[in-house]
Image (tube, grey):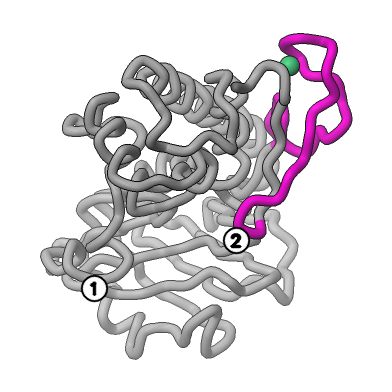
Amino acid sequence: MPELPEVETICQALKPVLEGASFQKIQLNRPNLRYPFPVNLESELAYYPISHVRRRAKYILVDFSHGLTLIWHLGMSGRVVVENITATSLKPSPHDHVIFTTSHNYKITYRDPRRFGFLRLSPTNQLGKISPFSTLGPEALNDPKFNAKVFYDRLQSCNISLKNALLNQKIIAGIGNIYASEALWQARLSPLRLTKSLTLTETERLLKELQDVLRRAIAAGGSTLRDHARPNGDIGYFQHEFKVYNRESALCFRCQVFPLSKIIQSGRATYYCIKCQQ
Ligand SMILES: [Zn+2]
């Protein structure tokens, strides 16, 4: 599933292609994905200049100069392929559901085999009032109003396990299952700890490591993007070196003594070291 670093990488790749350009054509190859496509999507957007491409949590937001925003979620398996229209090499697939053609001769293909992704439209100035944006917590990265003290207060306002707190989008936005486990391992905190038991110092450590995990993954995505951009512009997925995720029973990289444990919390797998994470 594309997590925050993947979505951020895709946003960074779309920015130079879309900002200042417009869509000339939006080809929909089926009536819906997770939800039906917005009515008249092409006539609502085509030929209007795109002012910004940005990310909020795991949503790509494309702002248009006439006051509309395209909300794009990549679901479980969404990939985005950017190609110059004069040099396309992508082999068409039955999972290519949306094809955008831009005024600057780019073709952007949205491929999503499991079809959990979606496109929605909203007036830009109403975004903060609609679900899920009205209840989203602060961004883990690059949010000037977010710091360890704010995070601490948010964690103290409930009493749930740390892992579930990181996945709770109302507490902090955009953290998915993989990076929650990775950040807790780096911060040496047990995923089972209750939020109220955390000290401010521990919260500072958690936020620092969480941001470090995300920044390193974004940097890895950027380098993968450069590699991938050469053959076919595929900017959907890349492999990271995970320290705990999917490493059940493998030796912990830190203590080199304990095999990593896998537990299920709220239906999601958590990987951690019982020795290093207290
Ligand atoms: Zn360990």
> Is residue 260 one of those drawn in magenta?
yes
Q: Nearer the viewer, residue 254 or 81?
A: 254
Residue 122: numbered disc: 1
Which range is magenta? 239-267
Q: Which kind of residue does numbered mark 1 sit on?
A: Ser
Which residue is labeled 2 in the image? 78
* In magenta segment, residue 139: no
- The earlier-in-sequence mark between 1 and 2 is 2
Q: Is residue 24 above or below residue 108?
A: below
Label 1 close to label 2 by CB (< 8 Å): no
Could you tell me which secondary element the residue under label 2 belongs to? Answer: loop
Tell me residue 115's x, y (percent): 62, 74
- The rendered magenta stretch, by its main secondary structure, is classed as loop
Q: Quick check: 229 above or below 232?
A: above
x%, y% of residue 246? Answer: 78, 39
Q: Residue at x 68, y 42 (%)?
A: 270
Residue at 30 percent across and 58 percent down: it is 62
Q: Amino acid at mark 2?
A: Gly
**Residue 21 visible at all:** yes
